[in-house]
Image (cartoon, rainbow, N blue to C red):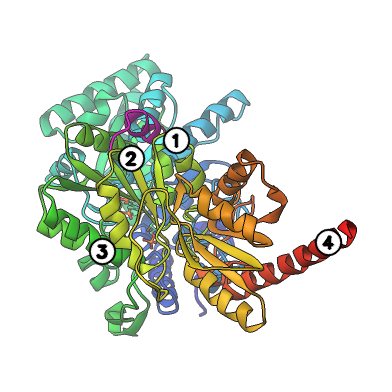
Amino acid sequence: MGLLLSQIESPADLKRLSDEQLNQLTQEIRDELVRIMSIRPAHFASNLGVVELCLALHLTFDFSRDRLIWDTGHQIYPQKLITGRYRQFSSIRTKGGLMGYPNPNESIYDLFMTGHAGSSVSTVSGLKAADDLMGQSERKAVAVIGDGAFVSGVVYEAINNISGMDQNVLVILNDNKMSICPRTGGLARYLDKTRMTEFYQGSKKTISKVLHTIPYIGEKAQHALEHLRDGMKGAILREGMLFEEMGFRYFGPVDGHDLNNLRTILADLKNQKGPLLLHVFTNKGEGVPEASADPVKFHTPPVITKLGPERTVLELKAGGARAYTDSMSDAIHQAMVADEKVAILTAAMCQGNKLEKVRESFPTRFFDVGICESHAVAFAGGMAKAGMKPIVDIYSTFLQRAFDQIFQEVALQNLPVVFTMDRAGLTGPDGPTHHGVFDIPYMRLFPNMICMAPGDETEVEPMLQFALQQKSPTSIRYPKTNLEKVERPKAPIRLGKAETVLEGVDGTFVAFGAIMPSCYQAVLKLRAEGMQIGLINARFVKPLDSETILGALKHTKFILTVEEGTLEGGFGSAVLEAANRANLDSRKIIRVGLPDRFIDHAERHELLAELGLDVEGLCKSMRKANEQFTESHTELTESLR
Ligand SMILES: Cc1ncc(C[n+]2csc(CCOP(=O)(O)OP(=O)(O)O)c2C)c(N)n1
Ligand SMILES: CC(=O)[C@@H](O)[C@H](O)COP(=O)(O)O
Ligand SMILES: [Mg+2]
């Protein structure tokens, strides 16, 4: 008999399987997840944990019509495997292959392309509201959200609204006791308490059935009685009271790996009315002993290089070279040693930002606020106002969540909050949800904000030091890549001052950020070809060093601005604006950066090459510009003769 997985083209095929076969399928799915992890890094522990939940949901509902959103979306792999994508699964997270997140272009079962946490309850509620209005109220609506994502403020905005509308929405809280790192805060404590309770085995179903048999008890009375019963149960056991008080009927906790029981409960809940919350306990990493023992490491581990029996992981690929993140976390540590006023904030990304050492060394000045970026920024505003020096260490893409707090609680108050924006630029296989390509525009547009990017590894620590001395908000962006260095004399960081690395005659690269070493390599190549190209390391986009940059515009034939960010409103645009203000010919400014479209997933180096941001691409743009401006320069001199 072949693999069962290969026979599942859509969830309808699941319904033909016996209990035993379904059990076998759970094993096959986990084997497939392990197989992928032996090829490339991918989201692992979260996917291992939701195999039974995914099957139970698709066995109970028909999500070709019903609505299902997996919050964040990093645990979508089992769904991909049972919705016709098993044969393409080997391509996941590669260029042109399946995405590592839900993707509506791949399947009708993936409703939204997501990767950021916290929105599922809102979008499911919106889908339900529209379905009801459009005469399709038979379509059910389900959101599955992890305990890490569940603390996001927007979830409570949705819960409040759903409760107010008394909407028929099922929220499944997938509680595995973990965000990427251990979850933090009061809600974590609250959820921990429910772990003392026995598993719920669907007793409400019995009560519901009994009530149906009593004559003259209408739906409303039944609803009220159930509420009363549930409330009493909650009052005694206290689990679920928080949700009950907010207008959701609470069910659980249930064992998220007991497929049969999950199916029974979901079948019951499917026909219940009003807002429902099902609390499911799962084990992050289920089925792979090392992953469940260390879900932090196995959230997105390196490739598995040696496997033992029963899916035991014997060896992972060894770590690579030092990255910008390492350099920044060391700089943060140093700054916290030197100054007791420096504090560090992360929004659940302690591991990604490599802050473990900082967390251990300075427990009282380390704040993991959970997946709550807006809160983190407003909180930092408060700290800065009271005299501390908070560093908000958040990925560029996730900081988008806090746009308004950056505006109001920080920039408008002109408070000295430091933003260290990791993963700024193309992040690679995570794709469009995770590329940090919008921060240059969204940061530089606020008055008071100082915006910087280190040109290479030598500037990371000095830039953080500089930022911590400012009286205004500052931001430092750096990419997800290994450190690089351009050998040159040291030049201290000064506000709004760029660094001229090489003087040019023909044209000049003006690089913003860690793309600078690639520009340097391009200059060396082009000089070998006879072109006298210069290089400016811009360091600041705000305040922009107009003097140096526009000086190059005046003294070389043209300048080519380079940034690993969107061109719309980015660094090159800032240079264009400056040239316009100075009445200079902006046609001599060529901008190289990211086009006005979302960039797919692929390895970072593949994307850089595709978008003309690798050394070869930069040389090409420079040669083309040199040709164009040499011609127009000759034409101009000829016409003047
Ligand atoms: C807005 C936002 N901030 C941060 C992240 C990074 N992130 C991805 S998954 C994750 C943990 C999610 O925990 P949980 O929801 O409990 O899911 P689990 O992995 O435990 O299944 C975090 C912090 C994100 N995706 N979106
Ligand atoms: C799901 C999610 O958002 C994270 O797991 C993300 O994939 C982390 O990215 P890094 O691997 O760059 O830390
Ligand atoms: Mg979790």
Q: Position of residue 119 (x, y in %)?
A: 43, 39
Q: Decide which of tag 1 and tag 3 comes sooner along the chain.
A: 3
Q: Decide which of tag 1 and tag 4 comes sooner along the chain.
A: 1
Q: What is the magenta range? A: 404-416
Residue matched to label 1: 446
- Screen quadrant of the C terminus: bottom right
Given the image, on which type of amino acid does mark 3 rest?
Pro
- On whether residue 533 falls in the magenta region, the answer is no
Disc number lying in front (2 or 3): 2
Whether pointer 2 and pointer 1 mark residues with C-beta atoms closer than 8 Å, the reply is yes
- Disc 2 and disc 1: Cα gap in Å? 10 Å
Given the image, on which type of amino acid does mark 2 rest?
Pro
- Disc 3 and disc 4: Cα gap in Å? 68 Å
- Disc 2 and disc 3: Cα gap in Å? 35 Å
Decide: is 189 above or below 160.
below
Mark 3 close to ligand 1, CB under 8 Å: yes
Whether pointer 1 and pointer 4 mark residues with C-beta atoms closer than 8 Å, the reply is no
Q: Residue at x 15, y 54 (%)?
A: 336
Q: Position of residue 419 (x, y in %)?
A: 33, 47
Given the image, on which type of amino acid does mark 1 rest?
Phe
Question: Residue 278 falls in which quadrant of the image?
Answer: top left
Residue matched to label 3: 295
**Residue 473 — which label?**
2
Decide: is 558 above or below 378.
below
Q: Position of residue 401 (x, y in %)?
A: 41, 40
